[in-house]
Amino acid sequence: MTASAPTALPDRSHGLLLDDPHFDAHRSQGHHPERPERLLAARAAAERSGFRWTRTPSRVPSFDELLRTHAEEHLARLEAWRGRQGNLDADTFVAPGSVDAAQRAAGGCMAMVDAIYDGVDDFGLALVRPPGHHATREKAMGFCLLNNAAIAANHARARGAERVAILDWDVHHGNGTQDIFWDDPSVLYASLHQAPLFPGTGLLAETGGAHAEGTTVNVPLDAGSDDGVYRLAFEQVVLPILEQFDPDFLIVSAGFDASYRDPLAQMAVTPGGFGWLAGALASMHTKAAPRKTMYVLEGGYDLVGLEDSLLASLHGARGAAFSAAEMHDPGLMVRTASRALRSHWSGLDR
């Protein structure tokens, strides 16, 4: 079976690109999987993609802008680390340039939202470091200092978006993003992730706070899940929910550590699988109503896997056809997630 490119896709031959040499200054003293070479791989994918990129400059956000997403105490703790080298926890390091890199990554994502709302383009790719989806409102963790996707989502809301969706396909659950929007019905957070795995959150029962039940969507997947399992999760859970939520702005927390090559997880997604996922999202768009979309880089720690998977995703976003893997659910995880979410969303009973 082949997934063909939708005939009504908007022109995806161009887009916005966020990149900044300051992001390379976030560098551990010893070996660390979250290393500057990751951006070399991501930049190569962007260059090979065939997109005509318009550069979005990074900027340093104001304190008040960051307060939309993070607690004052967290921001003060980070500021105290400016210019210093050390470790915030067993996983999360800071270098002399890390706080500036994190702030510019967050501010650059906000600048990309502005460019999209100002009509420069309706698609963007943010090649940022450090990643962000584990950073909670209160603290840094899991390689992450500031939550780039969440900051972008809150800025989109400030620019007028009524509903923002964040789709997180990083192999690790984005506990920080979930925490930030737990009780916010205007932001849908949907995650496909390996379970059990760090950080140990993202259970089926985690569906949102009292004022936002159902707007947190977790699809935990067994180790070894491949293209077919991810396709099933998309077609039976993610896409129906996205269509019903009907976001004004879509953010993809684009981690590529579900790659079969990645050393920090045990998934089996191929570049073609990522391309199919991106194509399925693009197929929700029409020329009459193009959806504002940005991809924000999260994880992905094998350099070849990162480059090839991001490249395929960009091709999928452009409407390239990728073979659709045969759907299967050996651990019944997708069907279990579908049943668990039926009380919040319709169309999940297939």
Image: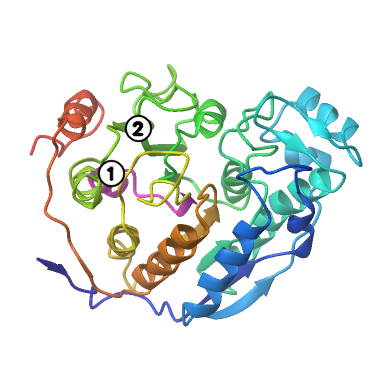
Q: Residue at 87% of width from left, 44% of height from top?
A: 96
Dot 1 crowding, Cα within 10 Å, few <14, some 14–19, many 20+: many
- For the residues labelled 2 and 1, the Cα–Cα distance comes to 8 Å
Dot 2 crowding, Cα within 10 Å, few <14, some 14–19, many 20+: many
Q: 28 or 57, which lies in front?
A: 28
73 over 272 or under it: above or below: above
Q: Position of residue 60 (x, y in %)?
A: 81, 52
Residue 312 sits in which quadrant? Answer: bottom left
Residue 119 sits in which quadrant? Answer: bottom right
Q: 289 or 267, which lies in front?
A: 267
320 over 233 or under it: above or below: below
Q: Position of residue 101 (x, y in %)?
A: 77, 51
Q: Which residue is mark 1?
A: 238
**Pointer 2 with pointer 1, Cβ within 8 A:** yes
Q: Tell me the magenta residue range.
A: 238-254
Q: Residue at 74% of width from left, 64% of height from top?
A: 20
Q: 275 or 198, which lies in front?
A: 198
Residue 313 lies within the magenta run:
no
Residue 243 lies within the magenta run:
yes
Q: Which residue is mark 2?
A: 217
